Amino acid sequence: MQNSTATNFHLANNKRKAVYSLNGILQGLVADQQLSEAEFLFLDTWLRSQKHLRDDPDCIDLLDLVTDILKDGKIDADEMEDLTTLISDIIEYKVVTNEKDSDLVNECLGIVSGIAADDILKEEEVNYLINWLSDNEHLFDTYPISAIVEALQPYTERELTNKEATELLALFKQITGTQFMQTGSTDVHPLHFVAVEPEDFSHDGLRICFTGTFDKGTRKEVEAIAQALGATTKKDVSKSIDCVIIGTQVSPDWISTSYGRKIQKAIELRDSGHPLVIMTEKYWTTHI
């Protein structure tokens, strides 16, 4: 019975995350009051990957319309207008209750993903995001929103240059892991941008915390590999560790997970001056 209860809780929690991500992505896609073909394809791909939304009425309506649009292999202006109208209605009328800060973080990451989906950043999209953030100032110290706020600060009272727009778009893609135009996939690893690749890396005497889910094996298995090479492994992030290694299988809503809180703490320690190295599993495996 306990296992069943826990499973139901996780399923409900995952659906909640997906709903807020959907709400954010839809806002991001139409932040400039338009929907491009690239954004349409991003939405189609993302919707079809969301197993937790298969019974969500709004997701079903979106998928039905997308399927109808794709029947003849063409996307005309009227079809885009119909889809944009449906998206706008969902944004306006979708009921999401009892918002938590983690819900809003997922929504914000969804907005940024939608904005970055087509590899084009417009002034209207930046302004939409700035306005959303100004309505949620209590999140300014929450990572990664703090990084987004810092990046946007110079542009709250002036327009972006083309170079600045390119740099800001690159940051948005790093934060969310959005690489749809490069890969055709909505699968992401949104934490590469916080990690580094040190020139020299030795396990000997190193105190390491592994967090997340790993391609290389279970947590115990990757810890055993590091221990065999001379490292000491720790369960929690603190000033008593030297390195945090992030598993490859990271979801876009990492911030609201238990391992996400470890990563956030590691970033805060590093940014406060503690000599802490944050690495991805991909780089770590080159040293084992």
Image: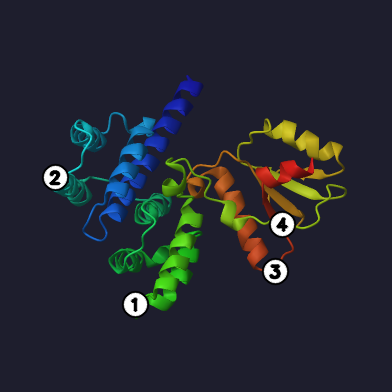
Q: Earlier in the sequence, mark 1 or mark 4?
A: 1
Q: Give yes or no for contact between labels 1 and 3 (Cβ–Cβ under 8 Å).
A: no
Where is mark 3, residue-wise?
273
Crowd class of label 2 (few under 14; some 14 to 19; many from 20; radius 10 Å): few
- Distance Cα–Cα, label 1 vs label 4: 36 Å
| For residue 61, side relative to residue 144 (left or right) | left
Is residue 140 visible in the rendered structure shown here? no
| For residue 133, side relative to residue 227 (left or right) | left
- Distance Cα–Cα, label 4 vs label 2: 49 Å
Q: Quadrant of residue 266?
A: bottom right
Where is mark 1, residue-wise?
159
Crowd class of label 1 (few under 14; some 14 to 19; many from 20; radius 10 Å): few
Expressed as whole percent of the image width and height from the top left, the position of residue 135 reads: 31, 66
- Distance Cα–Cα, label 3 vs label 4: 11 Å
Q: 36 or 154: nearer the eye?
A: 36
Which structural element holds mark 3? Answer: loop
